[in-house]
Every structure is written in C-alpha cells, then in structure tokens.
Image (tube, rainbow, N blue to C red):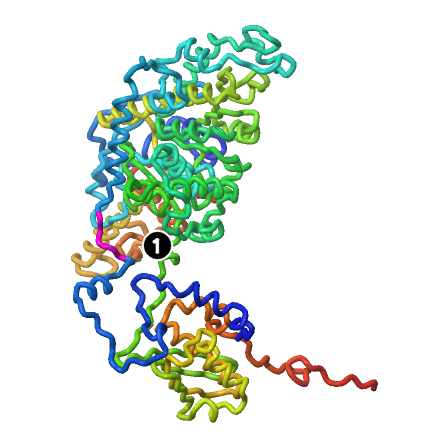
Amino acid sequence: MIIREFGVRHGRKVLAAAAPLRRGQQQCLRALSTETSGTPVATADPAVEAALQTNPENPSPVPSLFARDWETAQQLRRNLMPVGTKVEHRYSPNDVFRNPPGPKDVTLELLMASQAHMGHHASVWNPANARYIFGIREGIHIISLEQTAAHLRRAARVVEEVAYHGGLILFVGTRPGQTQIVTQAARLAKACHLFTKWTPGTITNSDKILPGIPVEIVDELDRPVGPAFNQHLMDRRALVPDLVVCLNPLENFTMLRECSQANVPTIGIIDTNTEPTWVTYAIPANDDSLRCLAVIGSVLGRAGEQGQKRRMEDAKNGKVTWETPSEIKQFMEIQQKRARWSKRAAEEEAAATSGGGGPNGQSSTTPPKSSDRSYGRTPSTNRDGTPIFHADEALAELQMEVDLVNAEEDVSPQLRNTPRRGD
Amino acid sequence: MSSLRTGSRCLRDIRQPGKAATVPWQSTSKASLAYRPKQPFNVTRFIATTAPRSAETTEIIPSDLESADQGQSAVVRVPYARAVPVSPSYFSRKPIFNDAFVVVQDLARKYARLPIIPKDKVTPTAWRTKEQYRLAVGEHAKGRDYATCMKLAKRLNQIHPDLMPEEVKAGLLPFKREVNYYLNQPKIQPIDQYGRSHGVGKRKSSVARAWVVEGTGEVLVNGKPLSEAFGRVHDRESAVWGMKLTERLDKYNVWAMVSGGGTTGQAEALALAIAKALCVHEPALKNPLRRAGCITRDPRKVERKKHGHVKARKMPTWVKR
C-alpha cells in the first residue's frame, strides 16, 4: 500500500540516511546529478576495478592470531601461577570426578571429610536406623562411619560381583545435581543411569513403558552378534535391571517397590530419616550431601569397573561367568532345530531324487504322513537369504522334529514343552 | 545373569530340575548330528540372593556349527548371548535425548573456561525448537530438560570460533536444524548489458513488468506515455510513486508492460515493479521505498462470493414470509 504522506514527512531525512552506500554495492552516479551521461563510466585503474569486484562476504583468509595468543596466555599463566607463593592442594569438588576413589580407598577419614556422618535432626529419625547411629550432636544424629564403611564395602562387593556375572546395573539419582554422579558411575561400571523421574511401571509394566527402546545381543566378549537375533529382538520383552543402586531412596519409593516385586536387589543410601527396609543393601550415609554421594557413587562405579574387568579377563580365558538367559536360549534352540531340520530335509530330497524318484524312493526311516507335508516344503527365505521366522510354524516344526527324534533316539522331555512367548 | 531375576520373567520358562542348564543337543548328539563340546566343562557358582541352586553348569559349546547350518546366514552361531541396552539411558524412556543431554553437560563442564564471544557476534544458528526436536528424534523430551539443555548448548556455541573444539560441534549437532536459514543470501538481481534492470510487480489482478534504465525521466507504459496510459492523476502518481518519493523521477527512464485488472491495480502493480527495479540500481533505496510501501506486495484480492450471500458477505434482504 502506498503511503503518500511518507514523502512529505520523511523523504528528506531517510534519503539523507540512505545516502552513504554500502561497500561493494554498485554506485549509482545518476543519483548525484540530474544530467545524463551518454557514455558508460569506466574505471581507469584495473587494480581499483579488481578491488571493487572482490566479494566482501568472502575475504581472503587471514590467519587468526587469537588461538595462538590465547594459548600463549594460558602457558604464561601456568608458568607464572606458582611464582611467589607455595601452592598446596586444596579440596576441589571435581577431584572425585577426576580421580574417582575405589573400594580400596574407602577410609573413615574420606567419609568424614565428605560429610557422610551428618544425619538429620533427631526428631525426624527413623528408629530402624538406630543401629547405624553413633550419637546426637547439636540435635543432629551422627551416623557411625564404621557402619558406613562396612556397608559401603559390602555394597561395592555386591556391585562388583553382579558386574562380574554380567548383570545389568542401574544407577539412580534423581535429585538435581546428581546427574554427574550417576553418569560417571554408570560409565565406569558399563551400567545404566537414570537422572530423571522414574516412570512408574518401568519394571512392572515394561511391556507398555519400554517397547522399542533399542537393545542389542552381545556375546561373552561383549561383541554384538550379527543379525541372527533380529527376530528375537523384535519379539523379546524389555530388560529388567539385575541390580539397582539408588542415591535418594526417599524420592524413589515407587522404583524400590517395583524392584522388590520383581526380585531385583537394590542398594540404597539410607539417611537417618529413611526406612532401611526399602532396600536390600543399605549404606547408612548422608544422602543430602552431593560430595558424599559422589564419593559413594564413584566407589560403587569403581567396583563395577573392577567386576567388568575381571569378567572380560575370564571371558578371554574361556571362562564365561553368566549363562544365556532362558528366552534367548529358547530362541537359539529353535534356530538350531530349524537349521538341522532344513539340512536333513535337503539331504532327504537329494536322496529321493537320486534314488530314482517316486514316493517309494524315500528312506524307510521317514515318519509317515504328518511330517511329509512339512518336509516337502522349502523354507521360505527373506530377500537376503535369511529364513523368515514364524513362531507358530517353528513350534509346529519343532514338535515334528521332536517326534522324529523320538522315533530314533531318546530326547530330553523339555523340548516337548517349549513354551511360547505371549501365551 | 538371568538367575538373579528369576521372578516374573522366568515363570514361563519350564525347566526340569535336573536338566536346568543342559542343552538339548547334548542328549541328541549321538549319531547323526554331532554337536559335541570340544572343551571340558567349566563349573562355576552363580551369585544368588537365595539358596544356591543345583546343577548350575555352563558349557563351552563350539561356536562353529558347521555340520548343521551351511548356507544359512541367520543361524545362531554363538554359544553365549545376552541382551544389553544400547544406550545407558535405557530406563529413562528417552535414551536419545538423555544421551545427547549428558554429552552437552559434559562438554559444558569441560570447556567452561574457553573464551566466549558476545551473543550478538555469534554466527546466527538455527536451533531446533522443542517441538522440532521431538519430531526429529521421536522422543517426547521434557520441556524443562530441553530448555536446560539449550541453555548449555547456546553457551557452548558462544565459544570463540578459533578455539571451538570439534567435539563441541559434534555434540551440538543434534540440536541444530539441518538448514541454517540465517545464512541464506538473497539472490542478486543483475543489470543487463544495456544498463536495464527488470522488476515485476502485482496488485489485485494486475501484473506489471518494468525495465528501468538511466535516463531523463521518460515513462512508457504499454507503449504509451504515462498520461495516456492512466487517465486519472492519482494513478499516474501511484505508478511512479517510488521514483517521485526518492527524487529519481528525472534520472531514469521506465519501459513497462501492464496487463490484467483495472487502472488502480495496474498503477500500483507498476509502482511495485518500478520500485523493485530501482532497488537493483540503488540498493540503498530499498529501506525508504519499503517505508513508503512500495516494496511490499499488497496481498488483498477480491474476496470470493459465497453461496447464500449476494456478494462475498452481503446477505439477501430479509423478508417476513
């Protein structure tokens, strides 16, 4: 829409403001004069012409000195900092993350320094914690650090052994500021972490809460196995942790309840106001101090790291410290059966064709009727050659296989009762 | 480790007590199908929260089952297998976001001391909004967490470009849009070899094309001078309003073609076309021209007639019975 008052009101001012042209834009000589020039204006100097043609958006790369200067300044600072003073080591909150203490480093001094002994006001205590309490000072319960150290060492042992036996450990700390603690512990112990709200039902209703979150199948050396288990990964149920370490049990009662329902052992930091029976392995300590939690978390993380290290060493020596979970074992059995069955079917087909053809050319050991139908069918395969897995067919074939093997030799009775997922 | 959580998950696992850990091919491997273990058994005790279980043995099964599965690529070839989560944030339900969030937090902690530049000096970055991130990742990241994460990410983005570490760039990548539209450059309109610039303008149903060349102020619209093309003075003024306003009326010649619509539409379409072409000659005029309303396309069109109405909105006269 044309604004006609504009020229009258503002024309002169904005024109004056617009007069200095930006660099690199074409100068309009016509704007300077009302006279027309018939000939185009040529620039005399080719160097000036070239300078005008350069694109101001992409100037020639000038090496920036900022990074070099900054590095020099840092170097200078490092060199000059100790001059004129005696620098001694002070406590830094990051020390526990730079060099995490392990179970061997647990001392009463360390626990005292990290304020693990500070309980709550005596009025809010839980009497079940009486055996962990050393006394009352200034109205505050003091936790016995001997108890803390003993329970912490026991919990570290539990974490280490669970890690050694290939268990899935979960570190939970859902208060603000505990993210770094749980992520570091999980990183050390090759475990899981949770620093956001525990979704109620993650264990007891995991079929609804955790579907589609990626899981992989690994072998004894933690190498992912190939696509052989893809069908199983699509069918299987969600994972359940084998051990849960909780830094703030007060806020995570739901999670601890679910763990106890699912027989998952738990380790929890129990302050004087917390119910110690919520967790399987209590660590009496101050759960309000991030410094104390960082020490405990790193001790448990180091323990898990040690367990993983031992497990990998044993696996390299041929000793596997865990057994294949039952659902994976069932899947593997079905796959083995299918492989053997298809091989035998191929052999029998080959024998039938080489034996002169006809229904009477088959071997005499072939069971009648029921297996004929399935034996004659070639296994359907995917485009890449992998066989398509159908649970119903596999089970039917498995039953036939069992019948077949029973005819020849004895077989373990558990094959007949292979359960089916979802029944 | 499944022995630790034999609660709800393993109820469906029907096992014989004596044959808990035996594998079926142990008993069926007599004659035809040779699955014999090549190594001796290793007997280990498993950790258990209850009484020790009987017959917990593990077998080292030969991983090469060459006798059975030739030609089948998907056949299970490993003796041991267990399921582990891909992400350590498995139990948080939002593994992708939480992993990226942890990375950003670690980077912010690690590079907190690198020098930063002011916010207005940072190259504009097209961040993903919360909704865009949710759509791209497929996880319902919480708004508060995403806001915290973006605060850290923007602080990391302020690190001086000469000192920006590669891992920071990689860590911020999930929160950036694929296309940084802030870096889009407008296409530069050329002036042709005869010194003409071309502009197109539309208004109502009219379309105008104008070629502007340096000259003495001659205007030809559809081959006719301005006074013949537009009978109304107001329209004549509208057509060259951009030039008149910027005092360029006597410095350029205009040759224009207009079609469609009526005189008002044609005149104002012409104003738009001339203003655009003028901007090609003198880009600095764009701002005053915009403020005069000569750059913006007027989007108003004739409103369509509706059924039940006499015109677009007029209702038929109401008659009692």
Task: Please name the predominant secondary structure of the magenta segment in the image.
Answer: loop
Q: Which residue is mark 1?
A: A369
Q: Is residue B316 above or below residue A13?
A: below
Within the image, what quadrant is residue A95 found in?
Answer: top left
Visible residue check, residue B302: yes
Q: In what element is the residue under mark 1? A: loop
| Residue in view at x 32 percent, y 55 percent | A372
Q: Is residue A52 above or below residue A313?
A: below
Residue A320 screen position, x and y as percent: 29, 27
| Residue in view at x 44 percent, y 73 percent | B246
Residue with the most extreme right position: B320
Output the chain of dot 1: A
Q: Is residue A184 above or below residue A214?
A: above
Q: Which residues are magenta?
A: A58-62
Residue B109 screen position, x and y as percent: 38, 32
Q: Is residue A207 magenta?
A: no
| Residue in view at x 41 percent, y 14 percent | A153
Residue B175 screen position, x and y as percent: 40, 47
Visible residue check, residue B47: no
Along the line of sight, the residue nearer the viewer: A309 or B53:
A309
Residue A34 screen position, x and y as percent: 37, 78
Is B201 displayed left or right of A76 in the figure? right
Rate crowding at label 1 as few (under 14), some (14 to 19) or many (20 or more) other CA atoms within 10 Å. Answer: few
Along the line of sight, the residue nearer the viewer: A153 or B193:
B193
Is A14 displayed left or right of B55 in the figure? right
Tell me the kind of residue under disc 1. Lys
Q: Quadrant of the N terminus of chain B?
A: top left
